[in-house]
Amino acid sequence: MENLLWLIPALPFAGALLLILFGRRMPRNLVAILGAGSVGISALITLLIGFQFLSARPDFYVQQVWTWFDVAGFTPGIAFHLDALSLVFVFVVTFVGFLIHVYSAGYMADEEDFARFFACMNLFVGSMLMLVLADNLLLLYLGWEGVGLCSYLLIGFWYKNPANGYAARKAFIITRVGDTAMAIGLFILFQTFGTLNIQAILSEAPQTWPIGSQMAVLVAFLLLGGAVGKSGQLPLQTWLPDAMAGPTPVSALIHAATMVTAGVYLIARTNVIFELAPAAMLAVAIIGAVTLLIAGCTALTQYDLKRVLAYSTISQIGYMFLALGVGAWSAGIFHFMIHAFFKALLFLCAGAIIIALHHEQDMRQMGGLRRALPVVFWTFLIGAASLAALPLVTAGFYSKDQILWYALAGERGNVWLYLAALVGAFITAIYTFRMVFITFYGEAKTHVSHPPGMVMVVPLIILAILSIVGGFIELPHNFAHLTLFSDLLQPVLPGIAVDETIGESEWMFQLLAAGVALVGVFLAYLFFYARRTAFEESIARSSLAMAIRQFWFSGWGFDKLYDTLFVRPFVYLANINKNDIIDSVYNGLAAFARSVNKGLSQTQSGIMRWYMMGVVVGAILILTISLLP
Amino acid sequence: MILAWILIILMAGGVLAWIAGRLNTTLPRWIALVATFACLCMTVYLWIELPASTDAVGNWIMRFQTPWIPQWGISFHLALDGLSLLMLLLTFFLGILAILTSWREIDTKVGFFHFNLLWVLAGISGVFLTMDLFLFYFFWEVMLIPMYFLIGIWGHENRTYAAYKFFIFTQASGLLMLLSILGLYFVHGYSTGVYTFNYFELVGTSFAPEVGALLMAGFLAAFLVKLPVVPFHSWLPDAHSQAPTAGSVILAGLLLKTGAYGLLRFVIPMFPDAAQAFAPWAMLLGVIGILYGAILAFSQTDLKRLVAYTSVSHMGFVILGVFAFNELALQGVIMQMITHGLSTGALFLLAGFLYDRLHTRDIRKMGGFWTSVPKMGVIALVFVMASLGLPGLGNFIAEFLTLVGSWQANNWLTVFATLGLVAATAYSLRIMQKIFLGNTANHPALADLSLRELMIAVPLVVLILWLGLYPQPVLNTARASVTEQLQAYTNPKVAEPAQAMLQTEASDSLTIHTLKGRTYEPK
């Protein structure tokens, strides 16, 4: 069964190829069947292989399809490596991907470029699977850039609006900055180990580099550069909110569930290198903590439904980074999976709302949708509850609680990281239910055209179920103590040691986390559902609050900063030198030659008097010089 | 003999096409096409037969030598190894595309056009084949003059200026190379008594360091201008943008590669010491070229000029890799020569297709074409992605190998070169945005690619994908030549001990002398 592994990425690629070549001439139904079907079959094969993997429990499967190239002992292969970590990712990519493809068939039904959409989506799924299955870093890099391309194509899917094209280019260029760092990391890895095979590097690294060695730290930071670019973490997060210009299923699949978590995958995949570089680990944790706070605050102020979700994604990936940074590897991956479920769900719900309201995305124009779109309301509520980590019943609670706990009690954790995560959880609850209250309660402001059809509703329901039950496979050890997920990952990702002195009081911190989430929901209720009291109104209207809101709304001024620091100087430099200053040197040379020519040709006047004069002056000059002592 | 036949077919075909041009306008096209296709077939045949013949004659698959002016040591000497074979394949493939794309574009002096086209190809093939330095200089000129006519007669509005500029830059630098060739000839003659232009005999010449540096400088002048390296690049944007489509394809795809080829074939093996001394500067020039070309490309509004500056940027990788002196980088350079030839050739062809429809190269007058020409859009997308180095396409392999190799030679310069990838993203995506995306309003609907145009573009797409996913055949073909060019650099480990031994012997005898002259001092 494991020799079917190559089919998992190959099928979506084949689908994409067929759609690119013949898509325009195919009937729409066939396009949808081909697009969703190829991913669906990949999902089925994943099930088969996954089932076999779980029953046989090998450490990994490897399948080499062909040697990519072979130069001077550098022999990366087109080869796939399946272990528990990649299995989790492949599962999420194919299943969530399949659901989103099905949903898209409904969502995009009225689009002109139906085939182009599905071709790009399939290409994306194929590249993403390549990324998570690659057995060497170069193939991983292929998938990594491939998903970047698809992200670019799909953000700019509605290409007629130049703003969308701008957002698409921004996404590509900013992630490319991170990729460049990563590429340099690969150069160092190759120079040190003579290979880019991941397993070989991971087993060699501890022998080559002592813990804290400069090279290990350098490499870890360079890889981290790639990861922050792709995952929209500080300082390269600015592209992700703009990426919402793409169709909503794209935001769900690429910019929430899968591609943006590639950074998390990369760090988890190269965990050995990061373990050797404590400074980099700390950086990962701090980046995660700061990002989750900054993005959370920004999410509080946005009115565009999709932008709230985008900032929320940045913030939730911040949690994953925090988990990785404190060494809670499996907690980070667990949160990735649960986040993929509920964030895809939220985006798809948002899509259903947007379509029903004729492409209206501003929450201020929504309201009262609870009655008009009941299924969307309930599923959105479930997703929101999971995102806000409401205790006990939601999957998000279990995954986020683990991260909070390890940020404090893990051997690399500390109280500051914990506080950041706790405050973040509080903010998350507020902005999440702010969305719920503004969108679904209050009075209706825009007419609802038609509720979503079955094709769109079924994926919502499935994802809603997963957003609840997904959490039950990993329960805290002070109640139930179920560790199916971390057991699965145990051969790939090292476990985490817990500080025993606070180990006793775990339930207290759980209560605190639960309480914080509930208080957040209550605050959202006070401000955005109930009529505001005069006191609350005065807080909201004070000039300080307005200034802060404006600052947060702009994404903490990062766009402006980068604009003045990098974009403008580059464009200015390019524009003033449009005519190539170096060319003017040569033109100057030519002009000089020409003017000398002009001057000398004056002397060829044909007038005898001047020639005589020349001869006489010349003779006098020569005489004078020769008579000089 | 098959090597001589290649040149004969091209040159004779050229003359024939010129004469046929007096009869009608279609015949020269067919003559040119058949001649180039015949050459391509011969080269492909050689490539397929390659493994068998490699064992027989070492690195050299085939040689052809006959005396020309024996009293001066000049012979008509051709030889083919993996590197030249790959370059010939590229030459004839792009040559065919150039002929096909001119099918409708050129309608004046058709016979003379194809004469020039075939003679440029002959000159280029000669440069890639000849192993006699005098003959090399001859072919170097042969490719220059017809090109001058191609630009000057069939070019765009500013063609005369561009043609002069092209001619003066390449001619002046070529003359410096001629000086070096003569210098090499005499230095070798003085030291061995054998006066010859034979590459194989000259390659082992040893000189005093200053002489080596000076001679290398002459060769470098010609190759760096041709490549081109900033600050000697400024002929290129003018020549590329003013030439007819076929001319731009040949300039970017092939003529630039003769500079790279010259570096690999002559500079690296002949002047190992001087080259090593110059290496950091050369790599620096490469990095400057990568970044400078990219920034300039970003601001251009003339599509062909834009693509021309991307060439400047991409050729920076070539010189960066050449002077890293290791197999990874050199294989990367050879891949870059081929994939850049294909991808930039393709972009110029697309510019030609657009010019054919719009009669402008100004991208400010374009936009939103995806709606009416989706096929062209997809193909453009592929090559735009190739030019920004997307993995899965050939250019990525080239750039990655070059950078991995150059990293081992110089870390910091490689870091800056890698930053070039970001700049490449910026200018490449700008091409896509300005032409195919954006608002469709106030643009006429264009006709999508015709069958002839698809026949030109689709093979390019297939090749660039093939080179990106399975480049091994190309790498294998180039391997032996790469090892040979690097012999002087990989062997120092063998050479050094020998030298060291000589030195210790000499110093031993010296010590004995001094001991004799001194009174013995007990320790």
Image (cartoon, coloured by chain):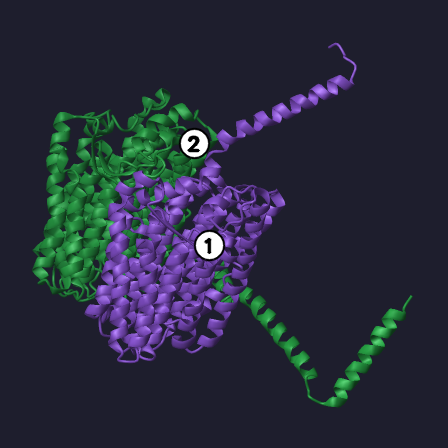
Chain colours: A green, B purple
Q: Is residue A516 visible?
A: no
Please report the residue visible at 49 percent of the width from the left and 74 percent of the height from the top: B161
Please report the residue visible at 90 percent of the width from the left and 68 percent of the height from the top: A628
Specify whether disc 1 shares its chain with disc 2.
no
Please report the residue visible at 32 percent of the width from the left and 67 percent of the height from the top: B12
Residue A339 image position (x, y, % from top left): 24, 42
In the drawing, what numbered circle is on residue B290? Answer: 1
Local crowd size for mark 1, using a 10 Å CA cut-off: few (<14), some (14–19), many (≥20): many
Q: Looking at the picture, which amino acid does disc 2 mark?
A: Ala
Residue B234 image position (x, y, % from top left): 50, 65
Q: Looking at the picture, which amino acid does disc 1 mark?
A: Ile
Compared with A59, B153 (above or below) is: below
In the drawing, what numbered circle is on residue A216? Answer: 2
Chain of the residue displaying label 1: B
Tell me how far mark 1 sits from mark 2, CA to CA: 29 Å
In the drawing, what numbered circle is on residue A362? Answer: none
Compared with B26, A111 (above or below) is: above
Question: Quadrant of residue B93 in the image?
Answer: bottom left
CB under 8 Å between discs 1 and 2:
no
Asked which secondary structure carries label 2, the reply is helix
